Image: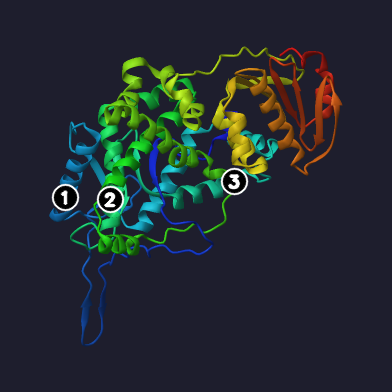
């Protein structure tokens, strides 16, 4: 379920989000045209246009912008600023690629598609999209959702750092001696990520999650990484006088998406950039930057399972008491013609991701902050039909009831359910997807199926899984 639902981030990137609000207008740079040598012969003249060799090409054949000496000197100065505020020193010179804006956006799209081929086996993307359809996130086809996801990758990011190849990538204007103030701010943000990569073993941490196929702790840790980068970038911006700030604002590129994107695409980014800094501020108040660095050293010092959860990001009080998710056992349902295809854990971000667009951010987060733990199993038949099961507990009975009420509010808010009725001590919402929910004051059990008769055939197992 986690992989099926949270498909909307290129996980190996930590990005500086686009600063401008999205609109329907499009403004991107025109791709650079490389002149070819051409000879035209007539009775009187021959004209030769010289070839302009590219400075360098990336792995996708996109041209990189050559940084002149002045920009390299600027990067050195910005590195010293980052070291000052983070309190750590670079172990090596960061690697960076500069692009024109259009080539940077193309890189983001191409790298996502390249990773897509590796991350999704045959039929797995189609299953991911069907899962989103059944949860009511969209009614898109696999092709339509992929197109939107590629556009999201293209237009969302103002700069990025790759956790694995450890290269920071930033779009800049071509043929300039120095980075402008806006470009410097993005470089500062990504330089913080580069410093984090050198000290906090972010490549090892990511690879361990990838090998486990469990990204439970990805979102909480990235929220702290982004918060630290935002903090240092904010310190850089505080050095501006009135005229600098005017110049900075005028230099922000008009990065726009070419199509309207679903609002739920941005929910993980809200965790990073809205809630992460709130927790980071509390950590800094209690122990200054050393305390934030200690939290980011958590993987090296204490291991993967001690990293912050998304619930701790939404509610800092739970970070300071180190509240962890409870591990739940979920029984396997016996189904004719269906096989178990995947299973995993369910946390606060998963609940917000599912519910926010239907019941609002406040209601969704209030329910999410109180999850004790969650576990899910998904089943598929030979025709690609899904049966999805989910089991949740709360921190106490009141929290469990709040989660139950949030799910029923979520279900009632959707016109796709044509009716609802009592069923096996719970409530059954009927439609193209059938949604059953039941609470016994200890656990919430949920089943989603496209086939109502399938639910009836396993009714003796529903109150027990």
Q: Nearer the viewer, mark 1 or mark 2?
A: 2
Q: Position of residue 170 (x, y in %)?
A: 31, 50
**At 25% across and 44% down in the image, what residue appears?**
96
Residue 169 in the figure: left or right of residue 273 = left
**At 47% across and 56% down in the image, what residue appears?**
21
Q: Position of residue 436 (x, y in %)?
A: 77, 27
Residue 337 in the figure: left or right of residue 1 = right
**27 or 146: nearer the eye?**
27
Q: Are marks 1 and 2 in contact (CB under 8 Å)?
A: no
Residue 340 in the figure: left or right of residue 114 = right
Q: Residue furthest front?
A: 285
- Label 2, secondary structure: give it: helix
- Label 3, secondary structure: give it: helix
Q: Quadrant of the C terminus?
A: top right
Disc on res. 397: none
Q: Position of residue 438 (x, y in %)?
A: 76, 22
Q: Are marks 2 and 3 in contact (CB under 8 Å)?
A: no
Tell me the distance, in whole angstroms, between the alpha carbons under discs 2 and 3. 40 Å
Whether residue 89 is situated above or below residue 178 in the rendered picture: above
Q: Are marks 3 and 1 in contact (CB under 8 Å)?
A: no
Q: Residue furthest bottom?
A: 44
Which residue is the site of mark 1?
Answer: 72
Q: Quadrant of the N terminus?
A: top right
Within-10-Å neighbours for mark 2: few <14, some 14–19, many 20+: few
Within-10-Å neighbours for mark 1: few <14, some 14–19, many 20+: some
Q: Earlier in the sequence, mark 3 or mark 1?
A: 1
Which residue is the site of mark 3?
Answer: 145
Q: Earlier in the sequence, mark 1 or mark 2?
A: 1
**At 55% across and 32% down in the image, what residue appears?**
349
**At 59% across and 40% down in the image, what residue appears?**
361
Within-10-Å neighbours for mark 3: few <14, some 14–19, many 20+: many
Tell me the distance, in whole angstroms, between the alpha carbons under discs 3 and 1. 40 Å
């Amino acid at each position: 379920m986690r992989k099926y639902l949270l498909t909307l981030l290129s996980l190996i990137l930590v990005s500086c989000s686009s600063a401008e609000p999205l609109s329907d207008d499009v403004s991107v740079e025109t791709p650079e045209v490389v002149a070819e040598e051409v000879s035209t012969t007539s009775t009187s003249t021959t004209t030769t246009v010289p070839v302009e060799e590219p400075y360098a090409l990336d792995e996708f054949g996109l041209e990189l912008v050559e940084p002149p000496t002045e920009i390299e000197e600027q990067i050195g100065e910005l590195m010293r600023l980052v070291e000052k505020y983070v309190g750590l020193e670079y172990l090596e010179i960061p690697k960076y690629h500069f692009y024109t804006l259009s080539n940077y956006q193309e890189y983001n799209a191409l790298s996502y598609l390249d990773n897509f081929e590796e991350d999704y086996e045959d039929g797995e993307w189609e299953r991911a999209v069907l899962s989103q359809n059944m949860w009511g996130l969209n009614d898109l086809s696999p092709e339509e959702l992929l197109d939107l996801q590629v556009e999201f990758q293209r237009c969302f990011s103002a700069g990025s750092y790759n956790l694995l190849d450890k290269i920071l990538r930033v779009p800049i204007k071509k043929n300039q001696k120095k980075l402008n103030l806006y470009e410097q701010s993005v470089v500062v943000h990504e330089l913080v990520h580069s410093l984090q990569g050198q000290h906090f073993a972010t490549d090892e941490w990511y690879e361990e999650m990838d090998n486990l196929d469990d990204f439970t702790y990805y979102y909480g840790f990235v929220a702290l990484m982004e918060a630290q980068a935002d903090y240092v970038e904010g310190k850089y911006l505080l050095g501006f006088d009135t005229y600098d700030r005017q110049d900075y604002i005028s230099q922000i590129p008009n990065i726009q998406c070419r199509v309207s994107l679903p609002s739920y695409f941005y929910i993980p980014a809200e965790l990073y950039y809205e809630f992460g800094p709130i927790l980071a501020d509390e950590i800094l108040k209690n122990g200054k930057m050393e305390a934030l660095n200690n939290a980011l050293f958590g993987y090296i010092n204490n291991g993967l399972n001690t990293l912050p959860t998304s619930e701790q990001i939404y509610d800092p009080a739970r970070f300071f008491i180190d509240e962890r998710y409870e591990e739940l056992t979920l029984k396997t349902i016996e189904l004719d013609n269906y096989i178990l295809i995947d299973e995993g854990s369910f946390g606060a971000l998963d609940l917000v991701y599912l519910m926010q667009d239907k019941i609002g951010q406040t209601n969704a987060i209030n329910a999410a902050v109180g999850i004790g733990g969650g576990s899910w199993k998904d089943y598929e038949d030979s025709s690609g039909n899904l049966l999805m099961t989910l089991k949740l507990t709360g921190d106490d009975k009141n929290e469990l009831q709040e989660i139950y009420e949030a799910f029923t509010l979520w279900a009632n808010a959707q016109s796709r359910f044509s009716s609802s009725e009592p069923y096996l001590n719970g409530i059954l919402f009927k439609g193209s997807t059938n949604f059953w929910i039941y609470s016994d004051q200890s656990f919430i059990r949920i089943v989603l199926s496209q086939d109502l008769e399938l639910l009836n055939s396993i009714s003796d197992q529903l109150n027990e899984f």
